[in-house]
Image (cartoon, coloured by chain):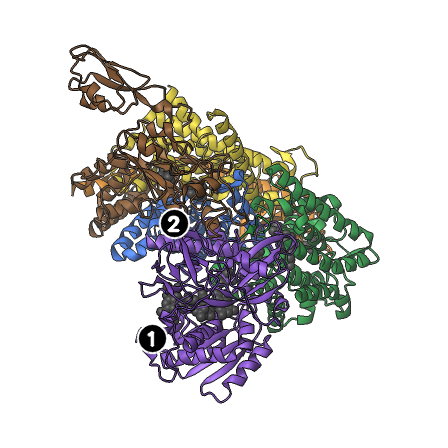
Chain colours: A blue, B yellow, C brown, D green, E orange, F purple
Amino acid sequence: MLKELFFIIIGSVLVNNFVFSRFLGNCPFLGVSSKTETAVGMGMATTFVLTMTAVAAYFIQNFILVPFGLAPFLQIVSFILVIASLVQLVEMVVLKISPALYNAFGIYLPLITTNCIVLAVALLIPQKNYNLIESTIFGVGAGLGFTLALILMSGIREDLEFSDVPDALKGPAIVFITAGLLAMIFLGFAGLVPL
Amino acid sequence: MTQLIKDFTNGLWNENPIFRAVIGICSALAVTTAGQNGIAMGLALTFVLTCSSILVSLLRSIIPPKVRIPCYIIVIATFTTMVDLFMKAYFPPLYQVMGIFIPLIVVNCIVLWRAEGFASKASLARSIADALGMGLGYAWAITLISIVREVLGSGTLFGINVMGQATHWVIMLLPPGAFLVMGILVGIMNMIARKSVKNTHCH
Amino acid sequence: MDLILISTLSMAGLGLVLGGGLVLASKKFAVENDPRVDRVLEALPGANCGACGFPGCSGLAKAIVEGKAPINACAVGGSSVSQKVASIMGVSDTGASTDKKIARVLCQGGNKEAKLKSDYRGVKSCRAASLVNGGPKGCPFACIGFGDCEKVCPFDAITMSDDGLPVIDEEKCTGCGLCVKECPKFVIALVPERNEVHVRCRATMKGRDTRDVCSMGCIACKRCEKACPFDAIHVVNNVAAIDYAKCRNCMKCVEVCPSKTITSAFAERKKAFIDDKCIGCTICAKNCPANAITGEIKKKHVVNQDICIGCGICEEKCPKGAITMERAGQKAENRCS
Amino acid sequence: MEEFKFITTSSPHIHSGESVQKIMFNVAGALLLPTVAGIYFFGLRALLLVITTTLAAVLTEAAFQKLRGKPITVWDGSAVVTGILLALNLPPGLPLWMAVVGAAVAISLGKQVYGGLGMNPFNPALIGRVFLMISFPVQMTTWINPVDGTTGATPLQMMKMQGVSTDYTKLFLGNIGGSLGETSALMIILGGLYLLYKGYIEWRIPTFYLGTVAVLSVLLGRDPVFELLSGGLMLGAFFMATDMVTSPISRLGKMIFGLGAGIFTVIIRFYGGYPEGVSFSILLMNAFTPVINRYTVPRIYGEVKVR
Amino acid sequence: MNQYARMIVVLVIISLVAGAVLAFSYKVTNPKIQEQAQQALQQAVLKVIPGAEKMTAVEKQGMTLYIGMDNQGNKKGIAFKTTGSGFSGPIEIMVGYNPREGKLTGIEILSMSETPGLGARIKEPAFTDQFKDKSVSDEFIPKKDVKVVTGATISPTAVSKAIKSSLAEVTKIYPVGGDF
Amino acid sequence: MLKTFKGGIHPPYNKDFTKHKPVETAKLPDRVIIPMSQHVGAPCDPIVKVGDTVKKGQKIGEAKAFVSAPVHASISGRVTAVEPRPHPGGGMVISVVIESDGKDEVFEGIKPPKSLGELTPDEIKNLIRESGIVGMGGAGFPTQVKLSPPPEKTIDTVIVNGAECEPYLTADHRLMVEKPYDVVLGLEAIMKATGVKKAYIAIEENKPDAIEAIKQVIKGKEGIEVAELATKYPQGGEKQLINAVTGREVPSGGLPMDVHVIVDNAGTCAAIAGALKTGMPLVERITTVTGTGIKEPKNLLIRIGTPFSEIIEQCGGFKGEAGKVIMGGPMMGLAQSAMDVPAVKGTSGILVLEKKDVALSEQLPCIRCARCVDACPIHLLPTTLGKLAEKGMWAEAEEYHALDCIECGCCAYVCPARIPLTQLIRLAKNHIIASKKK
Ligand SMILES: Cc1cc2nc3c(=O)[nH]c(=O)nc-3n(C[C@H](O)[C@H](O)[C@H](O)COP(=O)(O)O)c2cc1C
Ligand SMILES: Cc1cc2nc3c(=O)[nH]c(=O)nc-3n(C[C@H](O)[C@H](O)[C@H](O)COP(=O)(O)O)c2cc1C
Ligand SMILES: Cc1cc2nc3c(=O)[nH]c(=O)nc-3n(C[C@H](O)[C@H](O)[C@H](O)COP(=O)(O)O)c2cc1C
Ligand SMILES: Cc1cc2nc3c(=O)[nH]c(=O)nc-3n(C[C@H](O)[C@H](O)[C@H](O)CO)c2cc1C
Ligand code: SF4
Ligand code: SF4
Ligand code: SF4
Ligand code: SF4
Ligand code: FES
């Protein structure tokens, strides 16, 4: 059991990193990876939402969709509805309860609704037949993987400010190239865990 | 009319979602291993985008701002599921390739971006023009990416062998290839954009 | 039918629960956000130049709403912005009627004009160079010419000429004053936009010493002082200085300056024109410092355009508003915006 | 008295005399040792490969700089080092056109897109190698045996697939299959010691890298001597992980770098899909370098820790 | 209050309509989807059992087995699904088996996510064809009696292992030489 | 065990030019230019007019502020100008120009004070202030101010800085060899003035004769010790010195007194001794005139205010093509553009380098070799600071402790890419301080 959970984490952080090998969450990856501080904030916020989503998705799937035979066509709608509401709810609650926390990462919360990692995790959980604990861990792993990608990229991008990148490649282009090289490096983990 | 044409062409180049605005790129990276995937994904997104824009534009006055996002997203999700079911029913091989990325049209940033940023503020006609432009802009962009990756990675173009064994660079079909091709294409587009700006600038 | 019903119901239920949750949350966790911040932010120019001393326009907006900054803290926006901000904040805009100021370069010692005293090597920054033996130029007051001001201007209003002097685009300059703060040699000053005449030298050395190091420097000959009809220019500390409040752009000093230290575009010099409203009261003729107006009493007066210095006193004095000042040439119109 | 116009600069007015060129050409010189070993074992084919990649790297660099309208600075020697190191990381039998692709990728995507010398986040030679590895996996894993030129497996592959170890002396001297420059641990160590002596590489990275691998091998029940001597570990630890451009600047950071590279190498070697993990590990730590730099800022003289 | 009521009402109505519309679309497309799936399955089964024209599914000891028959109803072979753990994910394989002869009749890779150009080449006939007429008593060890795809040993190993282990189960139900 | 600190460099010392040359007294200058600011703090107000006659030792500039020091005429003669003149520190400073009358008469008010034993601490401090004594080690901080810490800052140690770690310079070295009694007497005055019982005279081990001479003098004196230091630059930097000798670290942004230490240069001590013995204020100092571009390198005892040109002439003039003239040592000295600037109280040396020795090679991008990081005695990240300065990111530079840089030049000295790191950091410091003042 523990071993499986470990594999889920390693799998989603390193081997099949959500950004570098599953191509998910690229827009926020591009958008908020220019400063390490914001990257860490965004990563934490996303991990938090992902974990909650994973749990919610598990319950909806197994207690509403499957029992009523709705899974094939209501999955997307119900998941996304839950995510959007959840994000908005969390945002409001955080703002009220701890303005400090809100300042730290509240500003990223609205962005998370459209982060496709979140919906993807929700959709992958039923597909992979994960139980509750596995689902939760999967959510955490996805978040950590995303955070790792953000932190690595933001570190490099902060250094890039001092680099003489050709004009045409400035901005997203060099970020993509760097992401490509990072993806190449992450292939080194290929075959690390049985999937 | 000229306004509509402007709205339409905006997505094709000026604010091309992939190359200029650089948004909604997950699918553009993920499914672009072969030319036909690009076309199919492009059309699917255009369909969802147009339908959602129509509905959002029609409903814009009824929806209270606080539940705006959930409402838009339900609309989008509905159309996406329809595409999903449709592809499953009629194009199973394609469906298998695109896998999870069809459902993910819901969260494709382009759709919500246009729903929020354009359709919720503009008239029906303009919303349609914009959605079509954006959709097709997305479609040509990812088709281009697909073609590059297919030619370099498999040596084929829409499944037809064009390069023989000369370009059988596995990396192009893998994630790094996607990012690298994307980066280089965005760079080229920047160069083109800059040139055209320079030409129209006064001296 | 069954399936449709169930799915409709469950979706409705989900919508109800989540909608209800959102409503509850938004009531329970409603947070007062001062909407004025956003409105002030909208009124600000959005250049994020930081000249106000706050982190960007949004920082200033917040500070204004919280009362930590005055409503006219944005120099870039000028009076129009401070009026808007004042109305949002519900206070009257005091002191917003100040004249707009822009930056002017007060040195003409470029690479050709000013001598170098040493062969400076190192960081190409004026401030860095000024810390090495006071800079490479022979004149310790001269522009160093590495363009720190150009780099700091958030509005791209400054370009360095081939001669190594900054040129300020009057149209782009917003008067934010960042360049003034940046220049280690205090070569740039904020002056009222309407003033056209400037002494472009700040060297307080003896005239002879100044001439040794720069061909455009003020040699303190005091000719300008004598030429000025308005007592607006004086040589203090070996260098001429204009009292901008008194100067009327007559350009007399410019004409007499032997070293071309004082500058103005003669194309900008205005001339007086008298129209038919003139009743021949002779007030203008009496007041004209250049004696350019002639005419008999109760007859329409005429201006000798060759003598008129464009000071505009006659225009001010004419009780009938019969005199207008017009530019002789057109303002140089060659900019690309 | 005579009139001179004196030079003025900010202090200091004297300099140690070190230069980038000096460093790079010394590294290139040190690399000659493993190169010679490669040529000895794999024949002139190996020499050809080294010349090809070096030329390709230098030309790519010049072409790129010309294209950008920047001064051409190939004489700083960094492209030469990249070229040689790339060759040392390739199977001796690799088709030459692939080597050219590798060198071009190394210099263009690995270095010039970031602005050239000193600004690249990743080790260019390794970018070239990994690119080739993933693009042409078959050719990149076709090893020839020394001397007789038949194809065979590397010691690590044999270990991974069949659990067979190789004789230490062979490993040490280099009479084994593998990349051109990685076979002779002896020559690599000699070159590395030379650079250490000259102060061009830092002892922390190789020490921590090799040390971590050795310790983990012991802990995980493997043969540490075998693990140290086989594969590209020695080459990586002495010549590639030490690339100053892509490794941390603080001393603590360098130790972390070595440690991390060691851990990842062991993970990939022991549990991953590849028999060898040196390239990936170094590149991965390159990616971590900015973060490491950020969090290992040394305590300055007189700083009172407030946090 | 009014504003809040409206929030809920609009959200509920939209969800409600969405639910209805989707359920309806599902009803329309579902038969087609099922049919597609069935067809795909049948195709795969018929492909791995040469000569079979139709199939029936049987459940035995927790396994689903498909019996392929020709038009006359003559049983031509048994097909079953098995899953191997490949380089980058599960590999689903359809295996055809003829108990009478104790040989495989063919295999087909149903789904996999192996590396294109490498592991993915297990889909190619060059790899799959070798299993045709392979005796079930063979060792199924890559590089020994199974030809591998160059540069990728893991994927073929996964396939071989999966076939070998599920054959062990199936031969318990339908022993070699026996009928079915 | 030789005492030292972490970081630093080993440049070629080139002290052989002058190390064994006894101090020569320079000839009386025809004209001296005495700037009203030769110290850290407020400039003096001139108290003489053009046409006045003055005598050696007469006060000509009055210090009004607390942190300031008076200046005195260094020769007798007539004041010919009181006007801004170029200062070797850069910029223009009000200076008094005195034309010599060739008589070198001593001002009437100059009288030897009471002996050290009879003076009270306050009298000692007053004597130091009135004698215009400022730090001779470089920065020129008024010594009396240093000796009057606020009451809450207790002082327990005095260190005499005899490190002289700058290459080429030997002024302090010769001073310690030739006048060890003066150095120790000055130190005793400081100890008495501050009530400190423990003192070290810190000398780098490459000056064995100086160590020997000082040891002879302090034999039998309570509480005074020689601290032998490893030869390394910047061993003489105050913070490094304190760390090497006492193991303490001056807190960032703090002063030596925060760790209960006062550091004074050996020359400063000798100057105090001079004032104690004769009552003559600070009007002359030892300067090392050296370098590859000087014909006859020497240690000269010069009058304050002597123009560089005269000093160089006495050393045979330039040799070859002079490329750079530096006031101070090669690591921290200031490059000069003109030869008519005067030597001031802090002019420990005049270094002339031939053009071929200063040829600068091309700057390349930083290769992140971290040599600068290893060399920095403050453990800063010069490469990072340099990059931040190039981008004008001053706030970030401050976060990376730019203000703690002592501008020792080690980083720029070692940088293989020849990046003017020290200058970049100096630029950043200047910016940060300017924005603070706003
Ligand atoms: C990017 C990449 C993807 C790979 N994908 C596969 C794969 O799908 N299947 C496989 O068996 N090996 C794959 N490999 C190769 C394995 O890592 C391993 O090297 C190989 O299985 C060893 O086989 P060999 O003994 O034929 O060299 C891949 C390698 C790389 C670099
Ligand atoms: C603004 C300022 C204030 C100082 N105040 C004191 C002081 O109160 N006590 C003291 O012992 N030294 C004081 N110092 C002197 C310094 O400790 C130091 O000796 C002086 O700056 C010369 O150091 P340097 O030659 O190493 O640069 C002060 C220095 C400065 C610049
Ligand atoms: C890098 C550096 C090197 C220094 N080297 C010496 C030196 O060799 N000898 C010296 O007396 N002062 C040296 N100083 C100045 C001392 O830090 C300190 O200011 C001085 O010893 C204080 O004494 P003073 O006030 O009597 O000059 C150096 C300062 C710095 C920043
Ligand atoms: C000690 C040392 C090691 C180096 N290692 C490499 C290397 O592994 N790969 C490489 O491409 N360049 C290497 N270089 C050359 C150079 O630093 C490299 O090309 C830069 O990354 C280019 O910016 C090395 C240089 C030195 C001094
Ligand atoms: S005006 Fe000042 S800042 Fe601008 S170039 Fe001249 S010296 Fe530099
Ligand atoms: S020229 Fe100076 S004052 Fe004018 S906008 Fe630029 S920085 Fe501001
Ligand atoms: S000059 Fe400053 S940064 Fe450079 S080594 Fe010295 S203290 Fe460190
Ligand atoms: S010494 Fe020079 S090249 Fe090396 S890290 Fe420092 S700044 Fe960069
Ligand atoms: S499409 Fe924008 S995050 Fe994936």
Closer to the observer: label 2 or label 1? 1
Q: Nearer the viewer, residue C84 or C312?
A: C312
Q: Nearer the viewer, residue D150 or E32?
A: D150
The residue located at (38%, 34%) in the rendering is B114
Crowding near pointer 1: few (<14 within 10 Å), some, many (20+)? some
Instruction: Work out which quarter of the rendered image holds the N terminus of chain E and state it.
Output: top left
Q: In this rendering, would D229 be left or right of E36?
A: right
Residue C110 percent location from the top left of the image? 48, 37
Q: Residue furthest right?
A: D148
Q: In the figure, residue F291 lies in which quadrant?
A: bottom right
> Which amino acid lies under the numbered mark 1 shown in the image of this protein?
Lys
Residue D161 percent location from the top left of the image? 69, 61
Dot 2 corresponds to which residue? A66
Mark 1 C-beta to ligand 2 under 8 Å? yes
Q: In the figure, residue B166 lies in which quadrant?
A: top right
Query: Image height check: is A146 above or below F147?
Result: above
> Which amino acid lies under the numbered mark 2 shown in the image of this protein?
Val
Q: Nearer the viewer, residue F23 or F51?
A: F51
Parent chain of label 2 = A
Q: Nearer the viewer, residue B72 or B186?
A: B186
Residue C121 percent location from the top left of the image? 55, 49
Dot 1: element: loop
Parent chain of label 1 = F
Query: Image height check: is B52 above or below C326?
Result: below
Q: In this rendering, would E112 be left or right of D144?
A: left
Q: In this rendering, would C101 be left or right of A151?
A: left
Crowding near pointer 2: few (<14 within 10 Å), some, many (20+)? some
Q: Evaluate if marks 2 and 1 touch, with contact meaning CB atoms under 8 Å apart.
A: no
Would you say residue C233 is visible in this rendering?
A: yes
Dot 1 corresponds to which residue? F153
